[in-house]
Amino acid sequence: MKHPLVLKSLALVAVFLALLLALSRIEGLVDERRARQQQAQQSVEQSQAGRQTLLGPVLHRSCVEEWERPVGQGANSSLLAEKREFRLTAVPARLEVQASASLQPRYRGLFKVNSFGGKAVLKAQWDSLATLVPERKHADSRMNCGAPILMVTSSDPRGFLAAQVQVQGQPLKTEAGTFHGSYPRGFHAVLPASLPLDQPMAAQLELELIGTAELSLAPVAGDTRVQLDSDWPHPSFAGRFLPANRDVKPEGFSATWRVSSLATTAPADFVRGARLCSASAWSLPDSGYAAQDHVSTAASGDDGGCIETFGVSFIDPVNPYVLGDRATKYGLLFIGLTFVAVAMVEVLKRRRVHPVQYLLVGCALVTFFLLLVSLSEHLPFGLAYAGASTGCALLLAYYGGHILGGWLAGLAFGTGVGLLYGALYTLLQMEQTALVLGSLLLFAVLAAVMVVTRKLDWYGLSAQLGSAPATPAGRAST
């Protein structure tokens, strides 16, 4: 064979491309499983209740002003009846919310969905209801207004299990709907006709609700204070306002928000009928890690017309599909570093490794990622990673002992692969420093190769490999 190095190089390129294709198929499998997980969450949301975003309590009142306008002159003059319909609103001066939420997982096949059940006590105070008193636009008009209505609206009213309303200590009957054109979903209570509109008013609401994945609130009061306790230890705080205080422990978390009307446009957004969106609509994409704070980066507040909200997402600290996808992106680096190590043995120990043996080693590396994804669907991610990496490292140590000329060499090879798996696990857990750690790893490998081969005569080596056969891998030299 005249050009063995060229032919072997071409064969290794073909092996590398085949392994790259296999990695891409595994990445496609991970994407498919992630899509099925999202479908499972959507199924639970459709069957139970979705992400909960609450707005209220607020007051509104519908009025109609009617008048007659003269038209024509002389004998042809007449009166034309006209009217205008409008709505008056009053937001609380102060709103205090004491809420608790407990996780109630739901399952769709292999996929777990974090749904929650909660209770909330809302105490609202209005300094005055003067904004519910209509002003006449025409001197001789007739003004007809309905009774003031207290309403609470939600992004998914199926989540309301029970609601009790008291105004000035008097229980009121709650009914479905809000009679508000912009926010029709929720419940309401009609205020007594005897309630004076020129005096302060206090209301207390007790709610039982359920939802999926996220709980949010729109701070439409002049001063909004929220205390939320939960047994979920992995909160992701989202929306336009982060908690003023928070305490995250293994047994759960406690968070407190305080939002003034000086810092939010939510009251004005409610009056103009802006859309009610979840807190995550204001947030950056979630990376799948716990106890993170997400705040919108849009300084202008251009969110597509949503009311400003804040809240918490009940995320899983380790999403196996997110981490599996990130792991497979390092697959190419794994294969490259392993092939470099085997090639160094070929160069330094004069042992020939067949392209088929390179292919088998690469297949073992690729199989690790498939094992990782499949095992993580049934085991905690840490155990799945340990099982998949240990199995592949032992297999490569055993096989490396035969292709590299002894069990010591195989043990060293398997140990090196194990260290690579350990480095990858560290990269997966330390998202913020993954780039610098990966760069340092590559630099260390490059430095090691340069140090080991610093005195190697590459021209002489090429001539030797092209003219004299080296010891084949798997056969002891004599």
Image (spheres, rainbow, N blue to C red):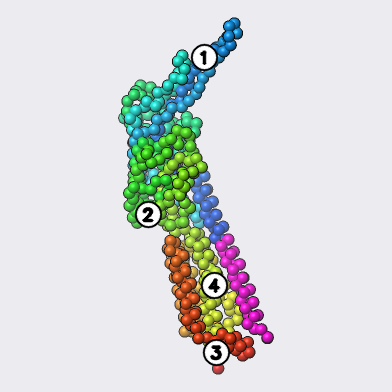
* Residue 18 position (above or below residue 342): above
Q: Disc 3 marks which amino acid?
A: Ala
The image's mark for residue 178 is none
Is 265 magenta? The answer is no
Q: Look at the picture and state if 239 lies above or below 332.
A: above
- Percent coordinates x, y for residue 257 in the rendering: 35, 45
Q: Is residue 147 visible?
A: yes
Residue behind mark 4: 335
Who comes first in sequence, dot 4 or dot 3?
A: 4
Residue range corresponding to the magenta coloring? 1-28
Front residue of 273/150: it is 273
Between the C-alphas of marks 1 and 3, the distance is 111 Å
Image mark for residue 476: 3
Camera-nearest label, 1 or 4? 1
* Residue assigned mark 1: 68
Which residue is depicted at the point 34% across and 41% down?
A: 225
In front here: 308 or 375?
Answer: 308
Q: Residues within 10 Å of mark 1 (few under 14, many from 20)?
A: some
First in sequence: mark 1 vs mark 2? 1
Q: Mark yes or no: residue 162 visible.
A: no
Q: Quadrant of the C terminus?
A: bottom right
Label 1 vs 4, first from the N-terminus: 1
Residue 10 sits inside the magenta stretch: yes
Check disc 2 and report the residue beneath it: 233
- Please give the name of the residue rendered at 46% of the width and 71% of the height, measured from the top-left corner: 441
Q: CA distance from mark 4 to mark 3?
A: 26 Å
Placement of 109 over or under 185, stated as above or below:
below
